[in-house]
């Protein structure tokens, strides 16, 4: 009986992992090759992610060498605009829909939004609190009300919190080529 139960657990776990790797249904009629590329890697990245002791890289393979602390980069927004290089910081939230963005604690109660170059990779949705190193480019940009509301919904905010967003805002953004989760 135990062998039957274990066999069923293994089979159902395998089916769930495979089914999660199905093609994303996108409304933007994007190139199918982009969807295929994202999904081939994402199933294995999520399935093999281990939060304890091991570092994992998503997107471009990077190391932690030479990373600037996010507090130092975000301290002077004028200097941060156009910054290119590595930044290290603590994850404060992750898109709960796909893992397609995350925020880092930028100090003074602010965060830095991190997206991934060309929507080419995702990060695990359970890395809030983890320390990461990102490599790419920072920019200051105005974020519309619609985009802020979309991000709030992806973060799992309540409808009341989403409805409270009524004005565009200037935000420090970072487009990452690669992410290293420590």
Image: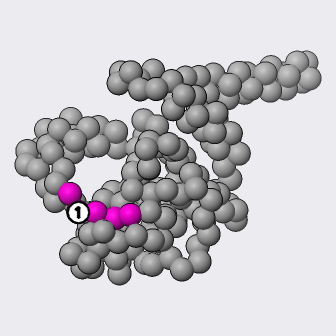
Secondary structure, mark 1, is strand
Q: Is residue 75 above or below residue 110?
A: below
Looking at the image, residue 156 lies above or below residue 29: below
Give the labeled residue for mark 1: 140
Residue 138 x, y percent position in the rendering: 34, 65
Q: Is residue 58 visible?
A: yes
Magenta segment, prevailing SS (helix, strand or loop): strand
**Residue range corresponding to the magenta coloring:** 137-141
Q: Which residue corresponds to the image point at 60% horizontal and 38% vertical from the top-left?
A: 42
Is the N terminus in the top left, top right, bottom left or bottom right quadrant?
Answer: top right
**Which residue is rendered at x = 7% and y = 49% of the image?**
167
Q: In this view of the protein, which residue sits in the foreground, 35 or 128? A: 35
Picture residue at 66% right of the left edge, 49% below the top: 49
Image point 35% across, 71% down: which residue? 83
Badge 1 crowding class, 10 Å Cα cut-off, few under 14, some 14 to 19, many 20 or more, is some
Q: Residue furthest left?
A: 167
Q: Position of residue 57 (x, y in %)?
A: 62, 57
On the image, the x and y values in percent for residue 95 come to: 40, 44
Q: How is the image coloured?
A: one colour
Q: Is residue 9 above or below residue 55?
A: above
The image shows residue 176 at horizontal and vertical percentages of: 45, 57
Depth order, front residue of 82/47: 82
Horizontal relation, residue 9 to residue 127: left or right: right
Q: Quadrant of residue 19?
A: top right
Which corner quadrant holds the C terminus? Answer: bottom right
């Amino acid at each position: 009986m135990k062998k039957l139960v274990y066999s069923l657990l293994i089979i159902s776990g395998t089916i769930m992992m495979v089914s999660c790797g199905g093609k994303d249904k996108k409304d933007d009629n994007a190139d199918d090759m982009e969807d295929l590329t994202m999904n081939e890697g994402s199933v294995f990245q999520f399935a093999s992610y281990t939060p304890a002791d091991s570092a994992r890289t998503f997107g471009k393979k990077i190391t932690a060498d030479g990373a600037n602390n996010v507090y130092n980069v975000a301290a002077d927004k004028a200097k941060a605009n156009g910054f290119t290089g590595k930044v290290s910081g603590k994850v404060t939230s992750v898109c709960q829909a796909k893992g397609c963005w995350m925020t880092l604690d930028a100090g003074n109660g602010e965060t830095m939004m991190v997206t991934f170059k060309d929507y080419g990779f995702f990060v695990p949705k359970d890395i809030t609190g983890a320390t990461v190193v990102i490599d790419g480019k920072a920019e200051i940009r105005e974020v519309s009300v619609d985009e802020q509301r979309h991000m709030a919904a992806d973060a799992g905010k309540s409808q009341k919190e989403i409805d409270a967003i009524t004005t565009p805002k200037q935000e420090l953004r970072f487009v990452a080529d690669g992410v290293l989760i420590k």
